[in-house]
Amino acid sequence: MNAVEVVVAARRRGAVRARTVSLLLLLAIVVVFAVSLAVGDFPVPLGDLPGLLFGDATGRAAYVVTELRLPRAVTGVLVGVAFGTSGALFQRLLRNPLASPDVIGVTQGASAAAVVAIVLFGAGGAVVSAAALAGALLTGATIYLLARRGGVHGYRLVLVGVGVGAVLTSVVSYLMTWADVTLAQQALVWLTGNLNGRGWDHAGPLAAALVVLLPAALLQNRALIGLQLGDDTAAGLGLRVERSRVALLLVAVALAAFATAAAGPVAFVAFVANPIATRLVGGARAGLVPAALTGALVVLLGDFVAQHLLGAQLPVGVVTGAVGAPYLLWLLATANRAGRV
C-alpha cells in the first residue's frame, strides 16, 4: 500500500467514525429530548408522547407537553446547535482553543445591549432579544476592526475580544448596581442563560436563522480547512484569505448572536462543544456537525439537570458554567506550561 492509499484509508476511517459519532449523538439527543418532555411536576409516560405530539390529543397532558415543555426543549436544541457551531468556527478558524464567543466578548456585547434595554427602557420579550442580537453583531464587528491590523491572528483577536468583553462587563455591572431592584433581578435572570418560559416566539426566529446560517457554515467548510493550514498555504490553494475569513467570522458571530437572543448567554456551551466533539471523533478536524450536535446535547442535559436534579429549578447557565469554568482553568494552566500564553 503506497502513501496515497494510506492517506485515503485513514480519511475514510475518520469519516466513518465521524458519521458514527454523529448518529450516536443524535440518538442521545432524541433520548434526552423525550425524557425532558416526560419528566416534571406533571409526569407523562414515555409511551404516550407519540400520540401527544403527532396525534389529535387534548387535555392537560397534551397542553403540558406541546405548549410548555416542547417549545422549551426545541429552543434548547436550537440554541445548543447554534452555540456549538459558532464555537467550532471560531476555534478552528483562529486555531485557538480560547476563541469562543463567550470568551472573546461577543456574548458580552449581547448581554450589555440586553441589560441596557431592560434597565434603561424597561423592555422585555422580543425587544430584549432584538437588542441582544444587535449588540452581539456590533461587538463582533468592533472586535474584528480592532484586531485586523496586519492580518487577523488567533491570539490577537482573543486578546482584543477579552479586552472589549471586560469593558462591556463593567458597563453591565454599573447598570446592575444603578438599576431598580426589580429590573436588576430581571436582567440577572437573563444574564445567567435561561430556558424558563421559552416559547415558539423564541424558537421560531432562531430556527429561521439556522436555516440560513447552518448551510452557509457548511458551504464554507472547505475554506475553513484551508485557513487552518495558515494564510500562506490557503492563498497558495487559491483561497481569498481575507474574504473567506470575514465570511466565516460573520457566520460565527451571527450564530452566537441569535442563540444569545433566544436564551441569553448560556455559559461555555460554545467553548466546550468543539473540544468534546473532537475527542469523540478522535481527529484534529471533527467537522461542524459533531460540534453542533454536542452543543445541543450539552444544553439539553444541562437544562434537565438544572430543572430536576439539583433540588431547585435553576437556569441552565448555572450548570453549563459549572462544567465549563474548570475546563477553562485547566486549558489556561496547560497552555501556560506549554508556553503558548
Image: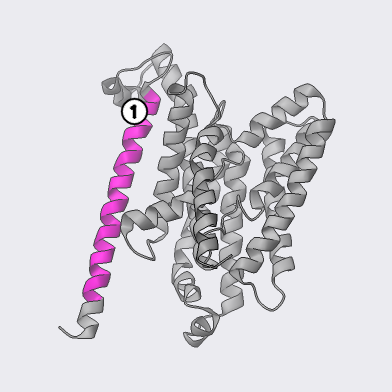
* Residue 35 drawn in magenta: yes
Residue at 73% from the left image edge and 55% from the top image edge: 164
Mark 1, residue position: 54
Q: Which residues are magenta?
A: 8-37
Q: Is residue 138 visible?
A: no
Numbered marks: total: 1
Closer-to-camera residue (44/126): 44
Closer-to-camera residue (62/296): 296
Q: Secondary structure at mark 1?
A: helix
Residue 317 point in image, percent of width and height: 55, 36
Residue 174 point in image, percent of width and height: 82, 38
Residue at 51% from the left image edge and 42% from the top image edge: 79
Residue at 39% from the left image edge and 27% from the top image edge: 36
Q: Is residue 269 visible?
A: yes
Residue 177 point in image, percent of width and height: 81, 32
Amino acid type, callout 1: Phe
Horizontal placement of 128 versus 14: left or right? Answer: right
Instruction: Tell me the chief SS of the magenta region.
Output: helix
Residue 339 point in image, percent of width and height: 54, 68
Quadrant of the drawing holding the N terminus? bottom left
* Residue 166 drawn in magenta: no
Closer-to-camera residue (166/251): 166
Q: Is residue 103 above or below residue 89?
A: above
Colour scheme of the picture: one colour
Closer-to-camera residue (100/26): 100
Tell me if mark 1 has few (under 14), some (14-19) or many (20+) residues whose alpha carbon lies within 10 angstroms of its own: few
Quadrant of the drawing holding the C terminus? bottom right
Residue at 55% from the left image edge and 33% from the top image edge: 318
